[in-house]
Image (cartoon, helix red, strand yellow):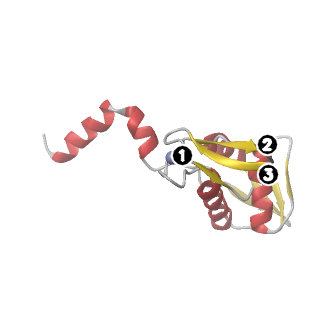
Amino acid sequence: MDYDDMLNRAIEETPEIDASSERFDVPDPDVRQEGNVTVYENFQATTRRLSRDDDHVLKFLQNELGTSGHIDESGRVRLTGEFRERRISTAIDDYTDEFVFCSECGLPDTRLVNEQGAILLRCEACGARSATSG
Ligand SMILES: [Zn+2]
């Protein structure tokens, strides 16, 4: 058995550690243009992965992109203006940096808590709490 096999075996045997310590996979944005509107097809797959509220993520996207948007009846986001997949992806990365990953331990096992009008990011893994801008 070589090193890679041992590594694979170790990963298979410890799925729960793998799930939180490995790269946090956020779906790549599936984006298409419809005239002057950018349709973000897999928005809800992304918010589910992040375990965050659709409206909260949408509000952040609108701020980041400097535009307005809404969630349509199919759960897609429709943003006014033309935005490339890469631009959306960067905005989602910024969101996860601020509202998903713990600033102390770097794990995504966090949730947002509202405390005295401020939204804090509380980490379930290490117990850290950090302020957010949202
Ligand atoms: Zn933490």
- Dots 3 and 1: beta carbons under 8 Å? no
* Count of marks overlaid on the render: 3
Badge 2 element: loop
- Dots 1 and 2: beta carbons under 8 Å? no
How many residues crowd around disc 3 within 10 Å: few (fewer than 14), some, or many (20 or more)?
many
- Of residue 26 and residue 131, the one placed in the foreground of this image is 131
Badge 1 element: loop
- Residue 12 found in image quarter: top left
- The numbered dot on residue 37 is none
Q: Is residue 37 left or right of residue 86?
A: right
Is residue 82 among the parts visible in the rendering? no
Q: Is residue 14 left or right of residue 21?
A: left
The location of residue 67, given as percent across then percent down, is 84, 66
Q: Quadrant of the C terminus?
A: bottom right
Residue drawn at the location 25% of the way across and 35% of the way down: 9
Residue drawn at the location 79% of the way across and 42% of the way down: 75
Q: Is residue 131 above or below residue 82?
A: above
Measure the C-alpha gap from mark 3 to mark 1: 24 Å
- Residue assigned mark 2: 75
- Residue assigned mark 3: 77
Q: Amino acid at mark 2?
A: Gly
Residue drawn at the location 78% of the way across and 53% of the way down: 58
- Dots 3 and 2: beta carbons under 8 Å? no
Q: Amino acid at mark 3?
A: Val
How many residues crowd around disc 1 within 10 Å: few (fewer than 14), some, or many (20 or more)?
many
Badge 3 element: strand
Is residue 6 among the parts visible in the rendering? yes
- The numbered dot on residue 108 is 1
Q: Is residue 57 above or below residue 37?
A: above
